[in-house]
Amino acid sequence: MRLSLVALILSGLATGCFLGPTRSVCVLDYQVISAGPEHTHLARAIPEFLTHELSQNPRLEVQDPQDVDRYLSDLEQRWTVRDHSRLQGLGMALGSDYFVLGSVTSLGPRFVVESRLFSIERGAIVPGTAFRRICQDEQDILMQIESIAEQLRHQILARTPEPKQQTTRSQ
């Protein structure tokens, strides 16, 4: 009997049954704020590295940036990523719980990388999830990715998707 219980527990751990609910997250391209075009590659590079780091956790379902590109390609000319109602609609179409939004600003030789979580359910930035890293150069940005991903992972897993509010009429 005890052996069966141990086998059941090990089986559940192996299949992820006891890990708790998963969260779906998508890292959007970062906005690059720079005087010149030499840093535009960071708009896609940072999300690619973050996507890889976040996908290491079995409780996070990280969507492929290619899937997002398919949806954004038609919409990009008509709206900005800062349009929360359209972001919410995109997130619902993708089946995401959260988007990671961010920017990287070039300040001379230094960079400021900012990241924040956008809740698809609420249609807004999640309070308390915005954070900033000051990096000495592009290589330092890459060195910070693991730390940024860890903070994002913690913020995502510390929250549950907000339940849809239902209005009931009293009779």
Image (cartoon, rainbow, N blue to C red):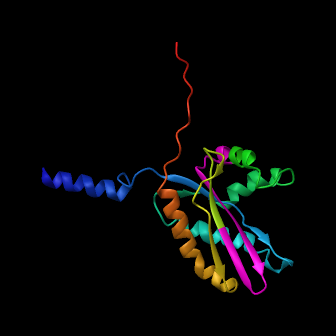
Residue displayed at 59% across by 82% down:
143
Where residue 68 sits: x, y (%)? Answer: 70, 55
Q: Is 87 positioned to the left or the right of 26 in the image?
A: right
Quick one: which residue is furthest to the left in this view? 1
Does the rendering let one see residue 53?
Answer: no
Provide the residue span drawn in magenta.
Answer: 91-114
Does the rendering let one see residue 4?
Answer: yes
Does the magenta-highlighted stretch encompass residue 34? no
Compared with 113, 135 (above or below) is: below
Residue displayed at 67% across by 44% down:
93
Could you tell me what secondary structure mostly forms the magenta stretch?
strand
Q: Quadrant of residue 152?
A: bottom right
Does the magenta-highlighted stretch encompass residue 106? yes
Quick one: which residue is furthest to the top in this view? 171
Q: Is 52 positioned to the left or the right of 5 in the image?
A: right
Compared with 27, 17 (above or below) is: above
Residue displayed at 23% across by 55% down:
7
Question: Quick one: 167 or 44, which is closer to the camera?
Answer: 167
Where residue 109 sits: x, y (%)? Answer: 75, 87
Compared with 143, 150 (above or below) is: above
Q: Is 130 positioned to the left or the right of 60 in the image?
A: right
